[in-house]
Image: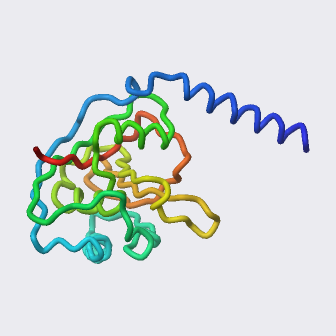
Amino acid sequence: MKTLLLIVLLFQYETEKHYEKLDTDKNFGSIITEITITVSTSYKPEEQIDNFVKRVKKDKTTFCFNEDFCSKNFLRSTGKLLPGKSYNIKIFQITGMVTTEQCVNFLRNQKAVMLGAQGLTLAYDVAGDEFPKGKYVTSFDEKDVLWKDPKGYCRVPVVFSSYTDDFGFFLGYFGANLDNKSCILGFFENK
């Protein structure tokens, strides 16, 4: 048992070491969707997710919905949207294997406003039909504001858009790897 644990820990260490050496920006491709929105003057971040949940759970195109995707669990976000202000929403294709930490670092370097579930739900509200088909779109936030499930894992909101225009709303794991079936979403201040 000790040998197996040692092998697993060594593999994890070598994998993390390998990821540190990668030129991670090359694993983030071009922007595949970009839209500009102006946040409604009636926008209330504390109500955004639950109002979204009420709408999409009834929608015929929703094939899956994680019940933990709710305001209670994702009320906090690092960034704040200002009602009446315009933002660019960009969805970046991932082209190689990346860690969630690398995704957060990439978004930080791009100067994204970190919004997590609030950003994902708002982006879906205004442009869900423009989400890439056959891809998982994740909206990250800083780890310290993410909701932790009962087992202590930090969770991140994810939307999957099928080729038949059906949508699934999931919670991924912060710390997992993402590949070319995934995209990341960021909000950017309009200057």
Q: Quadrant of the N terminus?
A: top right
Above or below — where is 17 with respect to 65?
Answer: above
Residue 102 position within the rendered picture, expressed as x and y whole percent measured from the top left: 46, 37
**How many numbered marks does the figure carry?**
0
Q: Which residue lies at the image location 49% right of the left edge and 58% below the top edge?
A: 144
Frontmost residue, 3 versus 140? 140
Q: Residue 142: give x, y in percent of width and height.
A: 43, 53
72 relative to 155 in the view: left or right: left
Task: Look at 83% across and 42% down and name the residue there.
Answer: 5
- 87, above or below 80, in the image: above
Residue at the (35%, 48%) spot, across then down: 137
Image point 13% across, 62% down: which residue?
Answer: 39
The foreground one among 3 and 82 is 82
Q: Quarter of the image holding residue 44?
A: bottom left
**What scheme was used to colour the molecule?**
rainbow
In-front residue for pair 24/123: 24
Q: Residue 170 in the image: state x and y as whole percent.
A: 43, 59
Residue 97 position, x and y percent, is 49, 31
Residue 17 occupies which quadrant of the picture? top right
Which quarter of the figure has residue 64?
bottom left
Quarter containing the C terminus: top left
Tell me if 40 is positioned left or right of 51 in this view. Answer: left
Left/right placement of residue 61 relative to residue 66 reads: left
